[in-house]
């Protein structure tokens, strides 16, 4: 015997069929590769933060400490993977301006961050730093203060003027009316440190944390606060991030007690 549906019955059957088809589609949409919202507040920095694969553009002077911080964050937030791209702040800003895909930007000065302000959330300073004079192990040329860098017999290396470390270096040298003729100007502060480590330069101006990261490969000559400059490190999420909530959670974590302990253990100062 054949079954004949009335118009109302046909509408009911169609609705049931449509609902059945939508169920698997909804299941697929929850695993499309975007960030996974586990229900926690975006900025809490807790284990309930959204899971995602994050790309963080960070100033070269953060290389060592951010590797440590990234490992700690991933351990506390299973399912989250952080990939860092380290370079001079001016290079990072250029990448953002060109639309390179990333989620978070951390620069070594506020002026660099200001250049891409339209592309970021409101930045928060997560740490501060100061300059020191890096010399060869044992300080063979007996460099004691900034004015010693003016000795034309010394091979001094500085960061390029467009690099935050270069700007800070120029600022403190100009303030003391010290003229230094560097043998090279490097694209980031880590390149300055490397030149000193390898003996290709007798001295260079780097951040205190860079000198500490080199261990006994270099000596660090302190610069009095009155003659020094304070470097500020702002962090912000990028507006084009496809993992906005997870990115915001990581930025918030950098200012949390856990994040701050890692930064300060590496020699960075409180924001």
Image (spheres, helix red, strand yellow):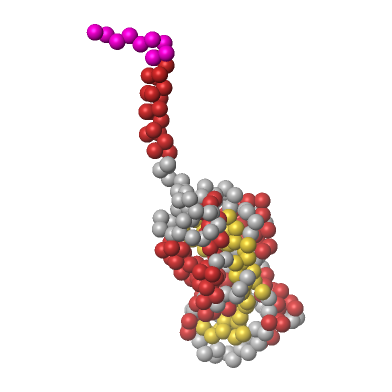
Residue 108 seen by the camera: no
Q: Residue at x 55, y 66 (%)?
A: 256
Whether 26 is drawn above or below 70: the answer is: above
The image quarter containing residue 190 is bottom right
Across and down, in percent, residue 63 comes to: 50, 68
Q: Residue at x 61, y 89 (%)?
A: 143
Whether 130 is drawn above or below 144: the answer is: above
Q: Quadrant of the C terminus?
A: bottom right
Would you say the magenta stretch is mainly helix, strand or loop? loop
Across and down, in percent, residue 243 comes to: 51, 50
Image: magenta residue range: 1-9
- Foreground residue among 145 and 202: 145
Q: Residue at x 58, y 90 (%)?
A: 141
The image quarter containing residue 107 is bottom right
Residue 48 seen by the camera: yes
Q: Quadrant of the N terminus?
A: top left
Across and down, in percent, residue 82 comes to: 46, 59
Whether 148 is drawn above or below 42: the answer is: below
Q: Residue at x 59, y 91 (%)?
A: 142
- Foreground residue among 200 and 21: 21
Q: How many marks?
A: 0
Across and down, in percent, residue 69 comes to: 48, 67
Spot the residue most to the left. 1
Q: Is-magenta flag for residue 191?
A: no
């Amino acid at each position: 015997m054949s079954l004949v549906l009335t118009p109302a019955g046909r509408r009911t059957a169609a609705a049931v069929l449509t609902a059945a088809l939508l169920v698997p589609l909804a299941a697929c949409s929850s695993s499309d590769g975007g960030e996974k919202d586990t229900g926690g507040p975006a900025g809490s920095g807790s284990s309930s933060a959204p899971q995602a694969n994050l790309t963080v553009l960070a100033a070269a002077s953060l290389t060592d400490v951010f590797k440590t911080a990234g490992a700690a964050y991933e351990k506390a937030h299973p399912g989250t993977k952080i990939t860092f791209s380290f370079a001079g702040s001016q290079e990072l800003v250029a990448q953002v301006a060109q639309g390179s895909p990333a989620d978070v930007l951390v620069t070594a000065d506020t002026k660099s961050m200001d250049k891409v302000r339209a592309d970021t959330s409101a930045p928060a300073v997560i740490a501060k730093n100061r300059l020191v004079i890096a010399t060869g192990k044992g300080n063979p040329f007996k460099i004691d203060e900034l004015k010693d860098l003016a000795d034309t017999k010394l091979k001094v290396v500085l960061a390029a003027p467009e690099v935050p470390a270069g700007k800070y270096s120029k600022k403190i040298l100009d303030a003391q009316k010290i003229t230094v003729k560097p043998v090279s100007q490097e694209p980031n502060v880590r390149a300055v440190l490397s030149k000193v480590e390898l003996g290709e330069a007798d001295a260079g101006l780097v951040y205190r944390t860079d000198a500490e990261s080199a261990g006994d490969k270099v000596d660090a000559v302190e610069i009095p606060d009155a003659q020094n400059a304070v470097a500020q490190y702002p962090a912000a999420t990028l507006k084009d991030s496809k993992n906005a909530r997870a990115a915001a959670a990581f930025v918030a974590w950098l200012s949390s007690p856990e994040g701050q302990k890692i930064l300060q253990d590496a020699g960075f100062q409180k924001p």
